[in-house]
Amino acid sequence: MAYAKAVRHRVNLKIALIGPSGSGKTYSALRLARGIAGKKERIALLDTENDRGLYYADEFDYDHDKLSAPYTPERYIAKIDEAVREGYKVLIIDSITHEWNGVGGCLEMVDKLPGKNSYTKWAKITPRHNAFIEKVIQSPIHIIVTIRGKDQYVLEQDERGKQVPKKIGLGGIQRDGVEYEYTLTFLIDRDTNVAISQKDNTHIFDSRYEMLTEEHGEMIRKWADGEIAESADQAILKVQNNHIPHVVVTDASLKAINDLLGVQNAEIKKRRTDIANEFLKDNKVERVRLLSEELAQNLIKLLKAVSNDEKLIRKAM
């Protein structure tokens, strides 16, 4: 077969949502799935979370199935194959954490193997885990997986100046590096439910900090089908057509903005996110990376002011 011009079309999306318990992974997955599937196509949800997948049955139209222990890779694979045979447009697997550390999952299987040589034991289990990951990635349907965050508590100062515990997620509970297997990987904040892209092959979510919705799912679907939801070039043209001088933001300023928006304090993060979204809206710019350097510097000042002085925020705005 000869080489031919590369054209993106009919990409089978693979999306991972990572977050601590209570961050809204299942709800976000259902919203994305409906946007990807459209109004008529069917969605399946494979539930390993003790029927939590039924919580939103009155808000979304989808089919539900339950996967119980043992959570072996082969049982996940069988359910993926079933969804493909049944003709579902989108499969949500909620979650794949159990395949790794659940009852009958990879870690438990290794522990139960005889012997003390971990390399020998993992040599038997790793191919089974890899077969599961390969099945997800190569399946001819769209798949959204959720991954539990590595919950940890830290002390943060609340509005009254008291130290209170806050649950944060430190990556996902799965084999290291699994998040990079996907087309898109989102980290979802527990307090705000805002999603930040950890990996984004579509470039749709560069410097976007929002709760995931059906509209985002539709944008991703258009990208997968070879349509252009809105390319960076189109967004820049829109900025220019609105007569906004556009000297592209420097990498240093973009990193500064990302760092300010990624702060762990939930209250500061929420206020900064709201300010950033309002700032972009007021300046008729779609994304942070499409700001001029001058506007980026103004935004940095506003975001820094959040943790300094409330009066300064109002004055700067």
Image (spheres, grey):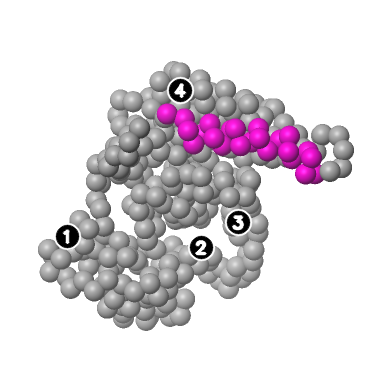
Q: What is the crowding at mark 3: few (fewer than 14 residues within 10 Å), some, or many (at least 20)?
A: some
Q: Amino acid at mark 1?
A: Lys
Callout in the foreground (1, 3)? 1
Name the residue nearer the viewer: 249 or 214.
Answer: 249
Q: Which residue is mark 2?
A: 266
The image quarter containing residue 287 is bottom left
Q: Which residue is mark 3?
A: 170
Instruction: Please name the predominant secondary structure of the magenta segment in the image.
Output: helix
Q: Which residue is mark 4?
A: 84
- Is label 1 in contact with label 4 (beta carbons under 8 Å)? no
Apparent side of residue 176 relative to residue 1 in the rendered image (left or right):
right
Residue 205 location, x and y as percent?
Answer: 36, 54
Residue 202 location, x and y as percent?
Answer: 36, 49
What is the spatial separation of the Cα atoms under label 3 and label 4, in whole angstroms? Answer: 33 Å
Q: Amino acid at mark 4?
A: Val
Apparent side of residue 25 relative to residue 276 in the rendered image (left or right):
right
Relative to 17, say whether 39 is above or below: above
**Considering only order in the chain, which callout, 2 or 3, is on the residue closer to the N terminus?**
3
Q: Which residue is mark 1?
A: 238
What is the spatial separation of the Cα atoms under label 4 and label 2, in whole angstroms? Answer: 40 Å
Residue 170 in the magenta stretch? The answer is no
What is the spatial separation of the Cα atoms under label 3 and label 2, in whole angstroms? Answer: 15 Å
Q: Amino acid at mark 3?
A: Leu
What is the spatial separation of the Cα atoms under label 1 and label 4, in whole angstroms? Answer: 40 Å
Which residues lie in the magenta part? 118-140
